[in-house]
Amino acid sequence: MRCLSLTYHALAGLLLLSIAARPAAAQSPSVELPRVLERVPAEYPADAAAHGVGGTVELRVTVGADGRVDQVTVERSATAELDDAAIAAVRRWRFTPATRDGRALASVIRVPIVFEPPKSDQLAPATAALTNEPPASPPPSPAGPATRPPAEPTGAPALPPPHEDELQVTVRSHSVPPNRGSSDFNVHVGELARVPRRTAAELLQLAPGFHLSNEGGDGHAQQIFLRGFDAREGQDLELSVDGVPINQVGNIHGNGYADLNFIIPETVESLRVLEGPFDPRQGNFAVAGSADYQLGLARRGVTTKYTRGSFQTERLLLLYGPGGESTHTFGAAELYRTNGFGQNRSSRRGSILGQYEGELGRNGSWRVLATGYTVDYASAGVLRDDLVRAGKVGFFDTLDDWQGGNAERWTLAGQIESHTTAAVFSQQLFVVRHAMELRENFTGQLLDPQEPFQLPHTQRGDRIEKRIAGTTIGARGFGRWHGIAHELKQEFEVGYLARGDLVDGTQDRLTSGAAVPYRRELDLTSRTANIGLYADVGLHPAKWLTLRGGLRGELFTYDVLDRCAAQSVRFAATAGFNGDSSCFSQTPDGDYRLPTASIQASGATILPRGTVILGPVRGFSFSASWGKGARSIDPQYVNPLSRTPLVELTAMEGGVLYARTLDKLQLTARSSFFRTHVDRDYVFSQTAGRNTLANGTTRVGWLGAVRAGTRTVDVNTTLTLVRSTFDDTGLLVPYVPSLVSRTDLSWHRDLPWHPNHRLLQGSLAGGFTYVGPRELPYSQRSEALATVDATGTLELAPLELGLVVTNLLDRRYKQGEYFYPSDFGSQSAATLVPARHFTAGAPRTIFLTATLTLGGES
């Protein structure tokens, strides 16, 4: 109690200090308009120069909070080829972003580009010199025509003079949480969106250490490995989209199940990935870390994209970005179907995303997001390696063609954010409805032994059928204040998350032949509530020193109704007792009881977190972070004796970050060492068909990441090394890769050919993944995994054509490998001797894409 009292008074004092430090006289925010750092002159089209064609192109340019040009639209046209030349040049400009009270904002500016036709004695085209400050008058053009350098876009008169209201600074992105050190990644997708990706989940690979697998089929959530954690489908990774939670609390297939397939990859603008629990804003499931998808659409107008390729795969994508609106205002719809690359791999899905962002007075914004998603899919499941080697089944076949499932997800969320001179306030409300059915078979016919009170039977089959449906309602918000003390900015923030989940789930065993249910293993209704509060302080004792840290308090309450609480008996209650039934109405000793049980439990914890950052000094920043995290326990494992139904962990890391702009190269490099200890962990059990509790685990590792970009090239490469062990035995945690490497590369430029005097653009992009051998049970090791994906496009506005090839080298690889007992008829009698199993990765696939954009420019 004394510790809590001291903490309370310390936080209260910091709050008063922050408020007192605000400039009392300031009543309006201090705004700095964007300035040009690097200007690329427009090239005068040769044909236009030869025919004396000139004019003024007026462009409306959106400059992002990172100083990059996000959007360019033509406000006043000259000719199509002059418009294209002006757009191509301005898209390569770099700015200092607009700021309000020192905080970077997106802004809208107006830029005129003047093309002066050559005089008759001028022989060849030329361009204006590149400069950071515009010359007082147009430079001489002895060699030919030139584009007049536009006036600095600060509202000064230009030709023709812009209207005053056409230059404005508006908020185009919500406030960004403060940096938490070397493992805090704000990933702008940018040109790396060209790299082939099947789903939005694969964008996570832009951050170090992510490896994705999927034994469940196209509509099943991806299994995520990160920093030595088998996060399954989200149990150890807090996932959200624009702040709206994706993890499902109480899903019996896996607590924290997070299906990312509803996100259309083309609508992802950036991701904030924080590896480790080092930010007080991180809540439930932030064990390995957290990732927030931030949606946006740079391309304006109406875009139609059609993809067709291997295995009768088709995809139709519609995108709409209304002109003059924020990049966060868009609509997107997707339809997809495929026969799959082998037996029982077909799928069909549809997804709709709609978002609108508007201004709230002069100093705020509001945003509404709505999503809808549905999928139906088949799954090949696992294969026994010995059956494939014996030639009894093919590498891309299935042992049970009954497997698969369907799912749906519906979301409605609204958020408002307002800014004052020294504060930011945000409030968000969300409602999510989700449902899924899943059919799996991991072990064939092994787990149905003859029990004493059952009628005589043979093995009836191990098929698992799960049905889950749930609703999530919640809210989150924060208030952030800042002031000046000792001539340096000091910050304080408080926030909350309130969330309630109501979930129904059943799990049945079905016969191998007619798929008739013969046993109910789970029948749960869980009502869970989570209240999280946090306080965070950002102090700057010196320009080269930053101290960030705070506390997060979590409260979880559980109300679980188990409708199948008694599943075994030792003595029959009556002579006619039916041992083949499920959910018995008697205790194991024969006494009568209801088959249901109601369990209530709760748990609370306080999680301190902190980061120290030294720098930047000559581009280098050094950081050290420490924090405690928590994961709510799966409701099926809650019991009334659990005083704290939580899984807790402690993490620490130290690293260095280097970020500089060197001439025309933007470079970011980082290196970090980390350690994480979890007091109780989950390990997936193929025999149970779900996660089961295990003992404590410890992970120690290192990560490195480099991203480098110029006007035409963008490269991102990462490497993670980690060792994960059980605390009690020292054995390696199974299925977790110890080495994960990923490289993404994109090259794009204007090509020298100009069909019909129009701008032709080309791009090449690729992704390379390498995953080292993984530990399997019983001291087995998996094979290494390596794949290469590539794509190329040609764009002649408004049409773009592309060729996409995944698994370019056509390597036959095993996406996931496992080691456990099963019986799929591979031998004369069932045995409990473990065997190697795997899920097959896709062979080489080839797709052609055609994209048509009307009424806008990206």
Image (cartoon, rainbow, N blue to C red):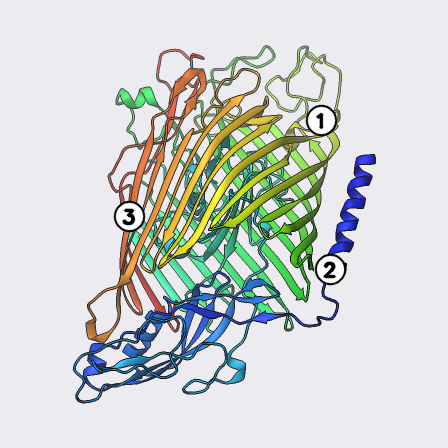
Q: Position of residue 386 (x, y in %)?
A: 32, 19
First along the sequence among labels 3 and 2 = 2
Q: Position of residue 611 (x, y in %)?
A: 61, 42
Q: Nearer the viewer, mark 3 or mark 2?
A: 2
Q: Which mark is residue 21?
A: 2
Tell me the element at label 2: loop
Relative horizontal placement of residue 241, taking residue 84 as reference (left or right): right
State which quarter of the image contains the N terminus.
top right
Q: Nearer the viewer, mark 1 or mark 3?
A: 3
Tell me the element at label 3: strand
Amino acid type of the residue tagged 2 in the rendering: Ala
| Spatial CA span between label 1 and label 3 | 51 Å
Front residue of 724/609: it is 609
Residue at x-position 27% and y-position 75%: 127
Residue 151 showing in the rendered view = yes
Q: Please report contact status of discs 1 and 3: CB closer than 8 Å, yes or no.
A: no
Name the quadrant containing residue 623. Answer: top right
Q: Nearer the viewer, mark 2 or mark 1?
A: 2
Q: Position of residue 115 (x, y in %)?
A: 31, 82
Amino acid type of the residue tagged 1 in the rendering: Asn
Q: Which mark is residue 639?
A: 1
Q: Position of residue 100 (x, y in %)?
A: 60, 67
Q: Is residue 198 above or below residue 736?
A: below
Residue matched to label 3: 790
Few, some or many residues within 10 Å of mark 1 (<14, 14–19, 20+): some
